[in-house]
Image (spheres, helix red, strand yellow):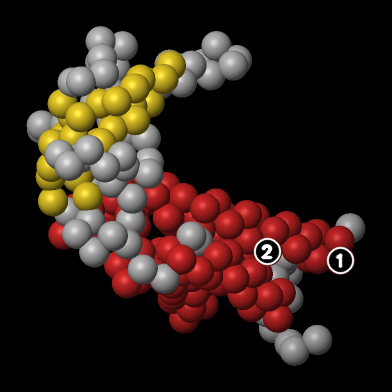
Amino acid sequence: MAHLRATVWGPAEFVGLPPWWLVRKGTLVGILAAGVIVGTTLFGAWVGRPSLADGEAGLVCAVALALYLSSLRAGRALVGIAALFGVCLALQAPQAAAGMVLAERGLVQSVVVTSVEDGRAADGGRTRYLCSVADADGVPLKVRIWRGCGQATRPGDALAVVYDPKGTVSPRGWQTGADVPGPLRDLTPWAAALVVCSLVAVVRSHRLSGF
């Protein structure tokens, strides 16, 4: 049972509180993993590299973290949980990165609604209306807008969108007084969970001997 517990959750071969250097190492591993996952996605969105902006590089980083923890012979359950948090963070990062780009260099313009679609979920979930829009020259935007698009919106109405002048991310609806970025706030719980799990995995991987 002791061997099984050590295999699943890590041996944690220390008495009392874990050594400070071990805690520092675990914290550093978690922060670096979260930073690289978010950072590569943000860089990809900023410069227009789809392979990075879409979160693919973040998924690779999550796998690399799992392999590193496995090399420390950390508990298998903790390695799996850390990998899961890393994947979730990588999947959430693209939307946040796009929001950061729009917050930093986005410009607001008025567009005209051409059609409104009721995006009600099939399971009776929250209703979301999607507006197809065109710019001042009548050129349709490739994406549909849901921010600012509501039940009362009709074709011909004007909506405000924020767009990236370099075109690396898609436009989004914009509302006066709305928090355009707010993006990193959504990533904080996932990043914190990843750091904590990585810390615990590293700390519990400690062995008094190399065997």
177 left or right, relative to 62 = left
Residue 206 placed where, x, y %?
Answer: 65, 77
Disc 2: which residue:
79
Q: Residue at x 59, y 71 (%)?
A: 60
Q: Does residue 69 appear anywhere in the picture?
A: no
* Label 2 to label 1: alpha-carbon separation: 17 Å
User: Where in the figure is residue 79, as x and y percent of width and height?
Assistant: 68, 64
Q: Looking at the image, which is closer to me, 111 or 62?
A: 111
| Image mark for residue 181 | none
Mark 2 or 1: in front is 2
Percent coordinates x, y for residue 191 in the rendering: 43, 56
Residue type highlighted by circle 2: Val
Q: Which residue type does callout 1 highlight? A: His
Relative to 82, is 193 on the left or the right? left
Q: Which residue is mark 1?
A: 3
- Dot 2 or dot 1, earlier in sequence: 1
| Secondary element at tag 2 | helix
Q: Quadrant of residue 162?
A: top left
- Would you identify the image quadrant in which residue 127 lies? top left
Q: Residue at x 70, y 81 (%)?
A: 71
In the image, farthest residue toward the bottom = 210
| Vertical side of 69 occupied by 169: above or below | above
Q: Is the residue marked by circle 1 packed among few (<14), some (14-19), or many (20+) residues within 10 Å?
A: few
Q: Answer above or below: position of 6 versus 156.
A: below
Tell me if 81 is positioned left or right of 133 in this view.
right
Compare residues 86 and 90 and report the one nearer the observer: 90
* On-image quarter of the C terminus: bottom right
Element assignment for label 1: helix
